[in-house]
Image (spheres, rainbow, N blue to C red):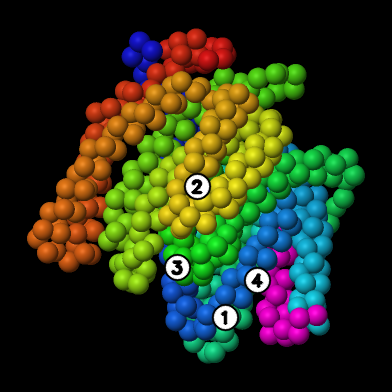
Amino acid sequence: MKGADWRKWPVMRALSRIRVSALVGGGAWTLCSKLVSQALQLAMFIVAAHILVPAEFGFYAFASAFAVILVVFSECGWREFLLKSAKCEQRKNEVATMSAVSALLFTLVALVAAWGVAHVLGRVWEAWLIALYSLWIMPAALSGVYEGVLISRGQLRRQAQIRLLAEGCGFLFAIGGLWNGWGAYALVAGRLVMQGVYLLGAAVTVRWWFIPRFDRGFTAELLEYSRHILLLRVMLQMRSYAGTLAIGSFLGLTDAGFYRAAERIVAAVSELIAEPARLLAWTLFRKAGGRSAGEEEPPAALGVMATRFMLILMAVSLPVYFGLALVAERFVPFLLGDKWQPAAVLVVVLSFKQVFLVPSFVTEPLLSIAGTIRKAPGVALFNGCVSIVMIVLCAPFGVLAAALGQIVAALIALGTSMYLQGRYGGLHLRPAIMGCGSIFVACVPMAIGVSVIGYLADGAAMAPVWGLVLQVLGGAVIYPVVLYLLRKTAIEAPLPATVLKDGGVTGAKA
């Protein structure tokens, strides 16, 4: 690349056009909101586990899963349609109308289910819990639309601030309800308060109250797009709950509890990375530009942007997951208590699994902007089926075997994600793979250093919490230094000369 100035990279040019400070600030606020959200959810889980009896908490988890699936169906990718559309402002009323209609439909489904639980199974308390949860579907679906408008306007900071306020209100309301003896109803009420505050805050911020509007031609286009997004989301939910259900069926609820605890820890860390990454990807890829009518390939600028973004994402993600795996033995008992120690080894395995899933974080925004999102649902269905099959096949052999089986499924998902992004999104695979290899090498000294610190802490009979702190600090010092030394082959991995010329895009495909 003849020592091209990094400031001339297309990704840097795009960043400058959308005000780097605003973008980074928005990403920081988004990360902060996710961090606070995960912390509040964890705190609520701990408090609820101490107050509710197991049967009550178990049914709440079941009702919550049922409601989440209905919300996924009611959202149908409306937010993502607004993010990809160049006519977001002109079409937001039509999208909101479809969102309200679908939410009303699935609210009725929830109410019918509640009626069945009450009159067929004779479970009145449980029926009222489901009925109360049904009230969450409408504001959740509309919130997705308003969130899409906020993000399309570049108001990431405002969106994150509203999320922080809403999560705080919901948490306080739920905790107050638990202490006042509301039981599981308090958790549902807290979620309703959170969603209501978020919807109201978003509406006030964008200064728009949707007016019902219907356009038959546009509705057909909207439904065609949402069909692809919906399948992706449904498969994600199936993958989320398959592990716990299969392990509980084959091995019992104790092992299922350990597995679910490990999943939640890794998922909490993953959300801190995934959500800001997706939001920044939508913003950056939109600036790079999508495929024009008549073009068979996505523009070269989008491919360059995707490649650089992927390398930066991996440089941020790998040390986090590797670090979590290295400190899991101390971190899990510190967070959950000594009785959860068996979950530590599962955290290690699932952390490595998640490393292979990081590239999939940007598949949806990249293919949407490239105009090839229709290629994604089939692959998502395949990956979801592989994950579920591996769980079912491996669970009878133990909870650790089930977790190891998910690494195999994640490796297959990695291959399919990279193929999709390279073939239909313009990602340059060779530089991306070479750069990821260098980032992995940078993690090796960090892993050695963290392990040595842990060994020395054990030898010195140091308190586990201080050993954990020293391990985290050691990794935080070692990794950036090594990554900086390897930057020319890592995050600055050279792209093909036919694609970059003195930092500019020529239009040729790698």
Q: Is residue 82 visible?
A: no
Mark 2 in CB contact with mark 3 (< 8 angstroms): no
Residue at disc 2, secondary structure: helix
Q: Which residue is mark 2?
A: 406
- What's the CA distance linking mark 3 and mark 4? 18 Å
Q: Which residue is mark 4?
A: 63
Residue located farthest toward the bottom when viewing the structure as drawn:
180
Residue positioned 69% across, 32% down in the render: 375
Residue 329 in the magenta stretch? The answer is no
The residue lying toward the viewer, choosing from 426 and 412, is 412
- Could you tell me the amino acid type at mark 1? Ala
- What's the CA distance linking mark 2 and mark 3? 24 Å
Place of residue 8 in the rendered image (x, y in percent of width and height, measured from the top left): 42, 20
The residue lying toward the viewer, choosing from 241 and 308, is 241
Q: Which of the two labelled residues, at mark 2 and mark 3, occupies the earlier sequence position?
A: 3
- What's the CA distance linking mark 4 and mark 2? 26 Å
Q: Which of the two labelled residues, at mark 2 and mark 1, occupies the earlier sequence position?
A: 1
From the image, state whether disc 1 or disc 4 is nearer to you: 1
Mark 3 in CB contact with mark 4 (< 8 angstroms): no
- Could you tell me the amino acid type at mark 2? Gln
Residue positioned 80% across, 55% down in the render: 97
Q: Which residue is mark 1?
A: 55
Q: Quadrant of residue 211?
A: bottom right
Image: 376 above or below 508? below
In the picture, the disc for residue 360 is: none
From the image, state whether disc 2 or disc 3 is nearer to you: 2
